């Protein structure tokens, strides 16, 4: 009988070592994942804590009553907004009284808490009244509060900082406290952040993403309608029809290289060719769209080719075997199977393009744009901004309120990107087919 | 057994894959309405030669075919021949069942549809039913024609592929190891089917199984290292081979 030298119940040294190595490797992997998650959380917390305030804004509620004579008088005056400011002061006094503010009932000081925008928006309303029938009109207005007052209600501005600030005084902040307690000054959801155009340094409260969102939408439309057909057609040709020779190899290598070209280079190219040589307008979505198309094409081509390659050759053989032409084989059998991959690649390419800033800076989309571009397709040639560029733009400005807006814009951008990526995952799940 | 007229004739066919000389100077006549088997060890070129007959090798860039292959006296490598039209006349069944990821009905209807064989839905239904019946799978799938073809078992998938190949009314049916992925029961079903098919088509089958060749074919060609060693009546090849290499192969000494 042979002597039993080892037992399965005790681990030998070698196995122990291997098990330890395996545990270490797992720990490294887990640590890597956790580090990634931690960084993501830090990013989200920082962006959200800085930017969520941008979605809320301080408004002053004033009931305004004007008659035809008042408006006509104001319109006849030389400095019209000054008269309208007077109207606001008159009506604020009444509003304050109604709200029960008796002490410190100073209408002029209260009107100072309003945005400079307020008189102009009252005038816009008043002028439309003139064209309608009637003699006397009233409306409850939610005027934007000035940026510093908004900052005070959100905690960004304090009594101490106001004492050093030329744009606001501690007395104004005290008045703001009173008005807030009276319910005249309220913080609520800021739809203007999504609809208003950019505003100047002095009117941070009126700055919105309207033009940037519209500009980004135009860019995406142009990129989608140019890059998808060109990219898919190029991939199908290269993958299914092109002879395998040196020229095809060369094209392939160059497409891969193109994907690695820094985006700013595409911006230079756009500036030199589309603006200086062809003469397309500066700051226009059409130029931005063309530049981003160039940038997105390699992504779409590479992912489409990968999707086409993943379709098993037996499907092609089967189709050719029953006498389908190469084109019928591609369009009836290969393309439907590759579609989920193509869609995913396209959406990821679009998401990249949506977040791209550098090339847009070079073609002038960083300009200060107050006017909305027209509807497509004419609007493609009007100046516009784009979301990432708007973020860049706002972070350049001195007023800390713009920093809050920039973070808010980043949140909007991230939400759009998340929607696109979720759509990509959803489409892939839905249309993925087994074979 | 009556000798049918030659359907396919090949003369001095050579195939090169880049620098590799895969088929060396093959000359043979394949008769009509007969099952002809190509046997030989792996890599001997029998599948390559089969794929020359419907020009499937055209899809491989580095593949070059020289020599003459005629079907009914027409050179299929003539410039004027459209391979798409040729493949309608010469159907093919592959080694691995490869139904399209579509319904059973659409799998069979696809060929007739693209060739315009049916004028309306009723005619198409008729063609599909006929093909599935001839493919000996109708009874198993008639109640679930709209289910995906990929959901069938391996043997059923292969018979579906055969039905798909015969739906376009080809004259020649090429089968590249059609039973290699099937279990013995499915294999015997497909073999029975092949035996039936010879009444309407000229069938050329590549197989690794000598028993299969003996069971289904009337003519057998033995390939070895790219050359066709011996070609003749199946009975004769298996009972009385003329070449030593053939004898070695069928007795299991090479291959």
Image (cartoon, coloured by chain):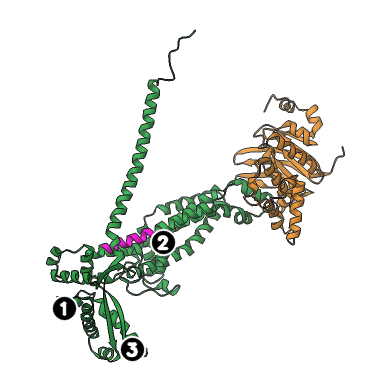
Chain colours: A green, B orange
Q: Which of the two labelled residues, at mark 2 and mark 1, occupies the earlier sequence position?
A: 1
Residue A300: x, y in percent?
47, 56
Residue B224: x and y in percent read 69, 32
Asked if marks 3 and 1 fall on the same chain, the answer is yes
Q: Which residues are magenta?
A: A404-416
Q: Is residue B72 above or below residue A370?
A: above
> Residue B238 is drawn in which quadrant?
top right
Q: Is residue A255 left or right of residue B238?
A: left
How packed mark 1 is, by other alpha carbons closer than 10 Å (few <14, some 14-19, many 20 or more), is: some
Query: B153 left or right of A228?
Result: right
Q: Are marks 3 and 1 in contact (CB under 8 Å)?
A: no
Give the side of residue B5 with respect to residue A56, left or right.
right
The stretch drawn in magenta includes residue A409: yes
- Callout 2: residue from which chain? A
- Mark 2 and mark 1 residues within 8 Å of each other at the beta carbon: no
Which dot marks residue A353? Answer: none
Mark 2 vs mark 3, foreground winner is 3
Depth check, mark 3 against mark 1: the one in front is 1
* Disc ID at residue A106: 1
* Rendering coords of residue B183 (x, y %): 68, 35
- Name the residue rendered at 42%, 73% in the picture: A379
Residue at 21% over, 72% down: A179
Question: Could you tell me which secondary element the residue under label 2 belongs to?
Answer: helix
Q: Secondary structure beneath disc 3?
A: helix
Q: Nearer the viewer, residue A242 or A73?
A: A73
Q: Chain of mark 3?
A: A
Residue under label 2: A292
Which badge, 3 or 1, comes first in the chain's sequence?
Answer: 1
Residue nearer the viewer, A270 or B75: A270
For the residues marked 3 and 1, what is the alpha-carbon distance in whole angstroms? 30 Å
């Amino acid at each position: 009988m042979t002597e039993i030298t080892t037992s399965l119940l005790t681990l030998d040294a070698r196995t122990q070592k291997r098990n330890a190595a395996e545990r270490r490797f797992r720990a490294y992997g887990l640590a890597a994942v956790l580090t990634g998650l931690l960084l993501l959380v830090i990013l989200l917390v920082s962006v959200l804590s800085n930017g969520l305030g941008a979605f809320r804004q301080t408004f002053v509620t004033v009931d305004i009553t004007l008659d035809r004579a008042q408006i006509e008088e104001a319109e006849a005056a030389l400095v019209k907004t000054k008269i309208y400011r007077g109207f606001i002061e008159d009506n604020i006094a009444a509003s304050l009284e109604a709200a029960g503010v008796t002490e410190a009932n100073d209408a002029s000081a209260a009107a100072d808490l309003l945005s400079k925008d307020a008189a102009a928006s009252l005038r816009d309303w008043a002028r439309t009244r003139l064209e309608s029938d009637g003699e006397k009109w009233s409306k409850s207005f939610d005027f934007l509060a000035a940026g510093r007052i908004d900052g005070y209600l959100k905690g960004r501005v304090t009594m101490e900082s106001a004492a050093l600030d030329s744009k606001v005084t501690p007395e104004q902040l005290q008045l703001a406290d009173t008005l807030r307690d009276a319910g005249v000054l309220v913080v609520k959801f800021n739809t203007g952040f999504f609809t208003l155009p950019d505003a100047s340094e002095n009117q941070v409260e009126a700055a919105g993403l309207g033009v940037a969102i519209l500009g980004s939408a135009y860019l995406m439309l142009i990129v989608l309608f140019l890059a998808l057909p060109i990219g898919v057609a190029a991939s199908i040709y290269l993958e299914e029809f092109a002879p395998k020779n040196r020229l095809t190899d060369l094209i392939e290598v160059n497409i891969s290289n193109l994907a690695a070209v820094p985006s700013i280079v595409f911006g230079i190219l756009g500036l030199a060719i589309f603006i200086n040589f062809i003469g397309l307008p500066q700051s226009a979505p059409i130029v931005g769209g063309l530049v981003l198309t160039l940038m997105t094409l390699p992504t779409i081509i590479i992912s489409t080719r990968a999707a086409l390659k993943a379709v098993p050759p037996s499907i092609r053989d089967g189709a050719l075997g029953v006498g389908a032409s190469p084109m019928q084989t591609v369009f009836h059998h290969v393309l439907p199977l590759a579609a989920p991959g193509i869609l995913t690649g396209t959406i990821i390419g679009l998401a990249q393009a949506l977040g791209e800033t550098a090339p847009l800076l070079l073609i002038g989309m960083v300009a200060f744009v107050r006017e909305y571009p027209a509807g497509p397709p004419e609007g493609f040639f009007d100046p516009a901004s784009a979301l990432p560029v708007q973020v860049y733009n706002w972070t350049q400005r001195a007023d800390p309120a713009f920093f809050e807006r920039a973070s808010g814009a980043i949140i909007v951008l991230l939400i759009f990107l998340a929607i696109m990526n979720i759509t990509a995952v959803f489409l892939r799940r839905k249309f993925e087919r087994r074979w | 057994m009556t000798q049918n007229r030659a359907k396919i004739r090949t003369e001095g066919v050579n195939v090169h894959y880049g620098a590799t000389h895969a088929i060396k100077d093959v000359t043979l006549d394949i008769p009509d309405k007969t099952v002809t088997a190509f046997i030989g060890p792996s890599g001997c070129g029998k599948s390559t030669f089969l794929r020359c007959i419907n020009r499937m090798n055209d899809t491989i860039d580095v593949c070059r075919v020289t020599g003459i292959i005629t079907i009914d006296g027409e050179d299929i490598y003539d410039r004027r021949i459209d391979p798409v039209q040729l493949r309608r006349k010469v159907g093919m069944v592959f080694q691995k069942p490869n139904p399209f990821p579509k319904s059973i009905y659409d799998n069979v209807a696809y060929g007739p549809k693209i060739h315009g064989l049916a004028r309306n839905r009723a005619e198409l239904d008729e063609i599909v039913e006929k093909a599935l019946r001839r493919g000996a799978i109708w009874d198993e799938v008639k109640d679930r024609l709209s289910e995906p073809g990929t959901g069938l078992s391996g043997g059923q998938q292969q018979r579906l592929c055969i039905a798909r190949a015969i739906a376009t009314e080809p004259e020649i049916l090429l089968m590249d190891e059609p039973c290699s992925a099937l279990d013995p029961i499915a294999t015997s079903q497909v073999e029975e089917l092949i035996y039936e098919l010879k009444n309407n088509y000229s069938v050329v089958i590549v197989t690794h199984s000598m028993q299969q060749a003996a069971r289904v074919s009337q003519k057998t060609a033995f390939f070895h290292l790219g050359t066709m060693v011996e070609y003749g009546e199946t009975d004769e090849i298996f009972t009385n081979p003329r070449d030593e290499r053939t004898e070695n192969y069928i007795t299991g000494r090479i291959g």
